[in-house]
Amino acid sequence: MKIHPLWYLCIFTRLSMVYIVKKYGNSKKYGHIIQIILMLMALGFLNKSIYGTNNEKQITKVFWHDSRIVHAIFFGLSVFLLYKNKTNLGSIILFIDIVFSIIYRLSIDY
């Protein structure tokens, strides 16, 4: 299995997001900004799940198209939980999304 080095950067970035959500998700100063960013990401995943394909290239060929809808659901659920002031659950959902990504990547034969 070939794993592009940028995949590791993606996982690290998303782990950083889990930390940021956990630490600042209920912040009056940053909470809404975090929600907006996560909602834009959820909508981006949803848009690409509807209009994108596995034939895309983003540095290398896209292998994760089939999982985009799952990421959209996880990110959307996280935003909803942050909106309801359940920061711990919101960060847990984002962490579960990372675990899903790792399992998905290791289980596909690309």
Image (cartoon, rainbow, N blue to C red):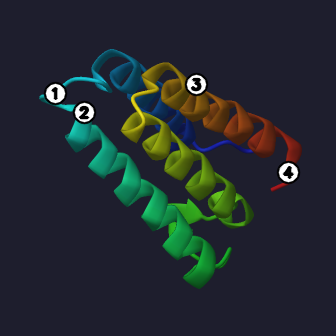
Label 3 close to label 4 by CB (< 8 Å): no
Query: To which residue does mark 1 refer?
Result: 28
For residue 4, what is the image quadrant? top right
State how many labels appear.
Answer: 4
Residue 59 percent location from the top left of the image: 48, 61
Amino acid marked by disc 4: Ile
Q: Is residue 28 left or right of residue 57?
A: left
3 or 1: mark nearer the eye: 1
Above-or-below relation of 110 to 17: below
Query: To which residue does mark 2 refer?
Result: 31
Amino acid marked by disc 3: Ile
Give the Cα separation between the discs numbered 1 and 4: 41 Å
Viewer-nearest residue: 86 or 55: 86
Amino acid marked by disc 1: Lys
For residue 70, what is the image quadrant? bottom right
Query: To which residue does mark 3 refer?
Result: 92
